[in-house]
Image: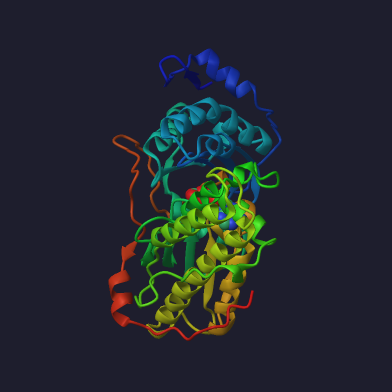
Amino acid sequence: MLILNKTAGVFFKPSRRKIYEFLGSFHFHPGKLFLHKLVLGIETSCDDTAAAVVDEAGNVLGEAIHSQTEVHLKTGGIIPPVAQQLHRENIQRIVQEALSASEVSPSELSAIATTIKPGLALSLGVGLSFSLQLVDQFKKPFIPIHHMEAHALTIRLTNKVEFPFLVLLISGGHCLLALVRGVSDFLLLGKSLDIAPGDMLDKVARRLSLIKHPECSTMSGGKAIEHLAKQGNRLHFDFQPPMQRAKNCDFSFSGLQHVIDKMIMQKEKEEGVEQGQILSSAADIAAAVQHTVACHIAKRTHRAILFCMQRGLLQPSSAVLVVSGGVASNLYIRKALEIVTNAAQCTLLCPPARLCTDNGIMVAWNGVERLRAGLGILHNTEGIRYEPKCPLGVDISKEVGEAAIKVPRLKMKI
Ligand code: KG4
Ligand code: ZN
């Protein structure tokens, strides 16, 4: 069994007896025969400790996840050493739970796939060192996974989607538009120049003290904004979508966040409310913020679709837009994107909500895709390192901007 030495904060190599105990903790089915390759996926890039076993046909045999959201909500954001400690405390249990649920023993695995980039250094380190111990103990191939590639390819687990397709990844740490041409062949069309939309929504939710709102206290910032927005009137506030003159597919959210901050301060003065108390206009602000974010994301995505069609990178008859990442679970933003895809005659696909946020399934599935394609399977893990920063694919965002495609105005009646 892999044991976390809490005082030293490192994993130590277990004795042979401990390994037998670990193996003994699984139910073996001597008659059981797995026809497909099996991959264990491990995800610790941010604040979720997650693991899953997925087979070659895309069947999820077992999964487990431990979310740190509640702890980080209380501290007002992710504190990396806290995230690292929580990953250390939970990784063994989560991997064991995923394996037990799958009734697959480690020796039956075809490979172990783990997110090694991009993400928080301290978090990535926990997943990588735990995985390397497993790889070493059970003599399995190791498949290093790019977190954003895993998000992008998840749709191929749930739907029959052929390459190429367009992907919009919107989460707390990432915001990008890319053309997916193959398992490890991505063209980056645009990205956020500052913060990601989820990060911005989290900051606005914090500034509005939504954690104190009885209906939102356990929700992530983005989810709290979506929830409250349903009770508000967006027309009470007028925030302008960012970068309206830049005819590219890049995004920006920090300027908008600054404008919203100023508006909240003004409202606090008007309502005679101290910072930290909930404004009576919080729901209206949430609705207006959500609408502006949705319009900004929709416009950039529309341009990306048009660019890909003009360049012959996507065929109008079969064009698919996949939206994933934590913010993709926002139904208002999805509806805005639906307006765009209807106008551009493109199919919109989103993985189910639980696969939009971080999970072990997407990592295991990316491992399966790589195994099938014979890409990036390591039999020797010497020198393998995690990479906190790592771009996605080949960056052609400058070329996209130079094309300066004018996007037709659409009525965003959501
Ligand atoms: O993909 P994810 O779990 O983690 C990464 O950032 O990689 O995304 C988490 C982000 C958070 O910023 C959270 O506020 C946002 O996704 N989020 C939402 C919703 N649910 C989660 N944003 C908008 N609407 C939602 N329903
Ligand atoms: Zn993510």
| Nearer to the camera, 241 or 266 | 266
Residue 408 seen by the camera: yes
User: What residue is shown at x 42% (from left), y 66% (from top)?
Assistant: 178
Q: How many marks?
A: 0
Residue 408, image x, y percentages? 47, 86
Residue 231, image x, y percentages? 70, 61
User: What residue is shown at x 43% (from left), y 31% (from top)?
Assistant: 126
**The C terminus, quarter of image:** bottom right
User: What residue is shown at x 58% (from left), y 47% (from top)?
Assistant: 220
Can you say whether 156 is above or below 145 in the image? below
Residue 357 seen by the camera: no
| Structure colour scheme | rainbow
Direction from residue 142 to residue 37 in the image, left or right? right
Direction from residue 361 to residue 243 in the image, left or right? left
Direction from residue 28 to residue 368 in the image, left or right? left
| Nearer to the camera, 176 or 61 | 176
Residue 391, image x, y percentages? 33, 55
Can you say whether 405 is above or below 327 in the image? below
| Nearer to the camera, 344 or 384 | 344
Residue 230, image x, y percentages? 68, 62
